[in-house]
Image (tube, rainbow, N blue to C red):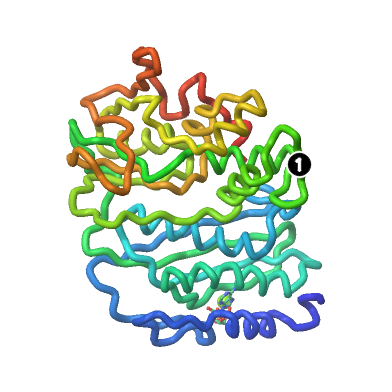
Amino acid sequence: MQLSEIGEFGLIRRIERLCRHKAEGLILGIGDDSAVIKGLSGFVLITSDVLIEGVHFDLRYTTPQQLGHKALAVNISDIFAMGGRPRFFLLDIGIPHGFDPRDVEDIYRGLNGLARRYDVSVIGGDTSLSRKGLLLCGTLIGESERPIRRSGAGIGDGIFVTGTVGDSAMGLELLKRGYRARGSRSRRIKAHHLRKLIKRHLTPEPVMLSRTDDVTSMIDISDGLLMDLGHLCDGSNVGALIYKDRIPLSEELRCVASALKKDPYAYALGGGEDYHLLFTSPSRDREDGVRIGEIIKRGRYIIDETGRRIPFKAEGYEHFKIRASKR
Ligand code: ADP
Ligand code: MG
C-alpha cells in the first residue's frame, strides 16, 4: 500500500483509531488543531527525543513496532529520571516515499502497547513526507510533585544504579555483526543470550524508582554510565568514586563478551542506551538500586579490582572506550 492511496488525512484517521487509550485528564486528543488536557498536578515536565533512520536505527534490524515502542520508551525514561509520572505523548513522523502506511500503523501498535502499560495517552503529532529516511520525534508531557534534577548530589551520597549496564550496547554490537534475535545460529553464543541482549537494545523497558524521598539527584543512562555520571557530577559540581567490581553486569553480557573476546566493562561503562537510572542518595541501601560508589568533593575515579584509583573523564575511561559500538 502507498501513502498516496490513503493520503495524509486517511493515515491520521487510521492513527487515531489506534490511539484509543484515554488517560485521566484528557479532554481532547487527536483530531483538532490542538489537544486539550487538564488536571496536571505539581510541576509539568516536558521532554522530546528524535529517532532518525541511519543515525539512531536501521530498518534492516528494527521492526516498525519496535521503533514505536522505543520512541515512547526513551521519553518515559526521561520523565522517570526526573522522578515524574508520564501522561501525554505526541509523535511527529516524517515518512519517506514508498514507505507502507501499514508500517506506520505498526509503529503506533508498538507505541500503544507501552502507552497502555504506563497509562499514557497519545494525544497528537504531525505527519509529513520525508525526502530521505524515516524520522520519529516524540514529545512526552509528565508531572511531578518534586522534580529531581542532576544538580542535587551531595558529598558522601551513595551512587546507585537500578540494574545491569552494557546489555544494550552489546545487543547493538551483535546486530551490527549480523546476528538476529531469531534465526541466528552460533556455536559461540547461546540463542537466549542473543535474544535478551538484542531485546534490551531494540525495546528497552523504562525503569522507575519505587520512592524518591531520599534521592538527591538522578539521570537516566542513555549516553553510557561514565558519560552520564559525568553529567551528574557536572550538574552537581562534585566528584565521584566508583568501584569496578560493584558495577552490575548481566550473565548474558559476561558470556557473550567472553565469546567475542571483548571486555564486558567496555560495554558497561562506555556503552549507551541502557535506560537504567543512575541516582544519588545519602541512604546506605536502596532496595531498587545497587550502590556502586560515592560522591566525593572533586575528581572522578574508578577503583579497579586491584584497588588502584584510575581517573576517568566524562568522555569515557581510556580502557573502556567503545565509541565504535555506539551508533
Ligand atoms: P494541523 O494542520 O492543524 O496542524 P494536522 O492535520 O497536522 O493539523 O493534524 C490533525 C490532527 O491529527 C491533530 O490533532 C494532530 O495532533 C493529529 N496528528 C497528525 N499527525 C499525527 C501523528 N503522526 N500522530 C498522532 N497524531 C497526529
Ligand atoms: Mg499539523
Q: Is residue 19 above or below residue 226?
A: below
Q: Residue at x 51, y 45 (%)?
A: 273
Q: Residue at x 73, y 37 (%)?
A: 177
Q: Residue at x 23, y 48 (%)?
A: 215
- What residue is pinned by disc 1? 178
Q: Residue at x 47, y 45 (%)?
A: 222
- Label 1 residue near ligand 1, CB within 8 Å: no
Residue 39 sits in which quadrant?
bottom left
Q: Position of residue 17 (x, y in %)?
A: 59, 85
Q: Which of the four quarters of the rendered structure image does ligand 2 lie in?
A: bottom right
Q: Is residue 265 above or below residue 197?
A: above
Viewer-proximal residue, 285 or 66?
A: 285
Name the image quarter holding the N terminus.
Answer: bottom right
Name the image quarter holding the C terminus.
Answer: top right
Mark 1 element type: loop
Q: Is residue 281 above or below residue 206?
A: above
